[in-house]
Image: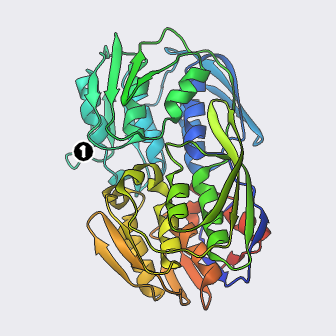
Amino acid sequence: MLKDSVNFRVHPSPSISGKAVIPGDKSISHRAIILSAIADGNSKINNFLQGDDTLATIDVFKKMGVDIKNNENFIKVKGVGLHGLYADDPIFDFGNSGTSVRLLAGLLSAQDFDSHLIGDESLMKRPMLRVIKPLQEMNAKITCTNSGTLPINIIGNQKIKSIKYKLPIASAQLKSCLLLAGLYANGTTEIYEKIETRDHTERMLTNFLHPVIKKDNQIYIKQANRLIGCEIDVPGDFSSAAYFIVGAVITPNSNIILENIGVNPTRSAMLKILKLMGANIEIKDERLISGEPVATIYAKTSKLVGIDIPEDLVPAAIDEFPIILIAAACAKGKTKLSGAFELRIKESDRIQSMADGFSGLGIKTELLDDGMIVEGGQFSGGIVDSSNDHRIAMAFSIAGIVAREPIIINNCKNVSTSFPSFVMTAKQVGINIDYV
């Protein structure tokens, strides 16, 4: 686990190779806890991500009377059923986890008790109106600040009604929030998404014997009578695997193997983007585990070229763009990213954070409102501030492998939200990384 005050230092490495063990998928781990908690009977979750964000989800459900045992190899949840949650203390702290707070806003809107949702300094600034407004249309008594941020206040004991809703933005968190509220809503809730977003919630509901109907871009969920506890195997997190995929692709004489990685097509568009840039990546042993596509990924040293990233691939690669932009900085020519305004409202303004890091490391960029243009070159050494953003910290750690001089990345503590074993895993494949 990471220390309280964390900075990384990465020295150039001649090559990286071997098998990198990637922890469980964060998005799927969240959803597994949520649905296990409100199911009837016991559930077992294997390969659960032991990160700060997912542990925050566990803590919230423990506070609502759910018996959850965590032995680190797996989680056991004794479900309380759809109507078995309670809260003696209505204040729920979600730490840094935007996924937890947005999904549970939907679930908590349908409970008999009041709720007050808060988070850390970063989470308190992130936009919440996207979930507040449609939940209000479902008759939820839910409010946030005038600026659209946490805290969220929910008055319980409301009769939630079904809704027909067109997603105004491509957001799996918004969609999942409404699906969870839809479990409690009279009738059938219909959600339309213009661009398909990650579908982990829909897939996992099927595991708990409450299937979701999908027709083209339309999603239908009926009010639930009950969910049935089950066993879930969580695949390796594709977003965490992405750092080692790019590390192998940009580093000479390198070859990385990543087993048991989730390759859900609604979130693995990075593979398509890297292949358009000329990356040598192979996907083998594809199969379904707990309803999720899983495979072994092989990545090797490649000669990358700059591209205009197709905007239709952006939503399914949104979390991977910090590391995709590192690949762009190592490519021949220019790479243009557009249609990615969502990056400005993540744990940091990721467009600005990446541009600031590039500027200090000798990479030329041009900022766009919804993206950036990156001109390929070579990283100098230097110091980067991660803006307390785990994905920025890990992305620039990979840049350090191919830099001329060491790179120091400051404020990396939040890597523990998604990949607590990042430094250890990096060392195991030959990356010269340590704490400073």
What element does badge 1 sit on?
loop
Quarter occupied by the C terminus: bottom right
Q: Which of 164 and 52 is in front in this view?
A: 164
Q: Which residue is drawn at 37% across and 59% down?
A: 343
Question: Would you name the residue on which mark 1 appears?
Answer: 145
Above or below, 351 against 14 in this view is above
* Residue 338 place in picture, x, y as percent: 32, 63
**Residue drawn 30% across and 74% down?**
367
| Residue 435 visible (yes or no) | yes
From where the camera sits, is residue 114 visible?
Answer: no
Q: Nearer the viewer, residue 103 or 70?
A: 103
Is disc 1 surrounded by few (<14), some (14 to 19) or many (20+) residues within 10 Å?
Answer: few
| Horizontal and vertical percent position of residue 81 | 56, 15
Residue 387's image quarter?
bottom left
Can you say whether 279 is above or below 94 in the image?
Answer: below
Q: How is the image coloured?
A: rainbow
The image shows residue 327 at horizontal and vertical percentages of 53, 72
